[in-house]
Amino acid sequence: MASGPKQQEHTPDHLSVPVLDDTTHNLPPIATLSINGQVVPIAEQDTSCHGCYLDCNSDHALTAALEKQKEDNLHISSQCFRKNVHDQQNGGQITCQSALYPSANRMKMYAVDENGDSLLHAAIIMDSEEVSIEYIDMTIDLEMLNLQNNLFQTPLHVAVLTNMLSVVERLVSRNVRIDLQDHHGNTPLHLACTKGNLKIVSVLLESSFLKKTLEKRNADGVTCVHIAALNDHLDVLGILLEKGANVNARESKSGRTVLHFAAETGNVRLLDLLLSCSDVNINAENYDGATALQLSRWHGYGDVIMRCLHNAAMVDKKPESSPE
């Protein structure tokens, strides 16, 4: 039997997204099928999440099965094997029948493979929205919807990474936790802000767990506000601030606020947005005692300096209200 192509050893862990890496990489698709030795990519529209592969040993194309998920007479006898590309070892077996037909075996919904993924994780990775939503609706135990795999990713993390808006909406409607963090310390909201997916961010912001999520820091010490600013997703940053995110939050490594980021990079659009916030602290200092104005001078951004000076002057000249 022909085996699928050997993956390169440098392929990173599956479904991880670097938060602060501003470089662009050509990453492999999130999942592929090996059918008679031919590699067929899944979810080609989004290659920013990667590393988890499915290997089907059957002559029957799994893609054809996905299109006929609801046909009761369709029988799939092939088995799908989850692989962790990082160590090239086979994971636990999940049959296509179980993955594509939730009603076929309800008990297996509560099983996990060697990567810690449930069938809901697998259905999302396989880019099957209809089946994923059926799993969500059939799952009574909320803990199963919040189940974290070996990388501490919940189904919501995976749905955000694969841009499955309808699945994110259904999970949030079931009141799953958006504050759970993966092995990089990222919540689903961190990931959505990294990707700049405004629609998914908007859905997550309606969660009852929003308050405890907005100020959470990942392993790099940054909040969602920092991530949106660093990636220049100003539309995302705007709605985060509207929902009560702290514009003066300091990242853990050097104590910079997003205003410091704007000043040291000369990002005038970001600066304009931040200075429109009534509660922004233009005199906030980083751990070295430097303000945004000082940083802008050191980095030679004259227009940024002028905007900061103008804003400071307007604050200083603001007349005090007269006693009645």
Image (tube, rainbow, N blue to C red):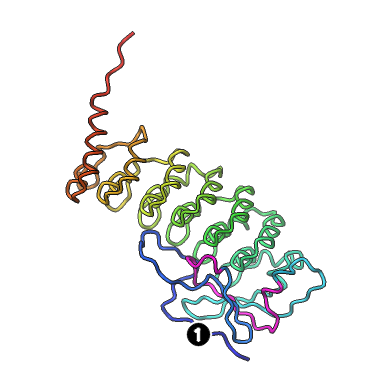
| Number of other residues with Cα within 10 Å of mark 1, as a class: few under 14, some 14 to 19, many 20 or more | few
Image quarter hosting the C terminus: top left
Task: Let me know if residue 142 is in the magenta part.
Answer: no
Quadrant including the N terminus:
bottom right
Q: Nearer the viewer, residue 288 or 191?
A: 191
The spot of residue 19 in percent (x, y) is 40, 59
Q: Which residues lie in the magenta part? A: 44-65
Residue at the right extreme of this rendering: 73
Residue 144 shown left or right of residue 279 in the figure: right
> Does the stretch in magenta take in 52?
yes
> x, y percentage for residue 294?
19, 44
User: Circle 1 — which element?
Assistant: loop
Residue flagged by tag 1: what amino acid is it? Lys
Q: Residue furthest front?
A: 303
Residue furthest to the bottom: 1
State the residue position of label 1.
6
Q: Nearer the viewer, residue 177 or 75?
A: 75
Q: Position of residue 111 (x, y in %)?
A: 65, 67
Tell me the quarter of the picture where residue 281 sits.
top left
- Horizontally, residue 246 falls left or right of residue 294, namely right
Report the label total. Answer: 1
Quarter where residue 94 is shown = bottom right
Q: Residue at x 65, y 83 (%)?
A: 57
Residue in front for this viewpoint, 92 or 124: 124
Closest to the observer, 319 or 158:
319
Reply above or below: 39 against 160: below
Residue 296 location (% of width, % of height): 21, 46
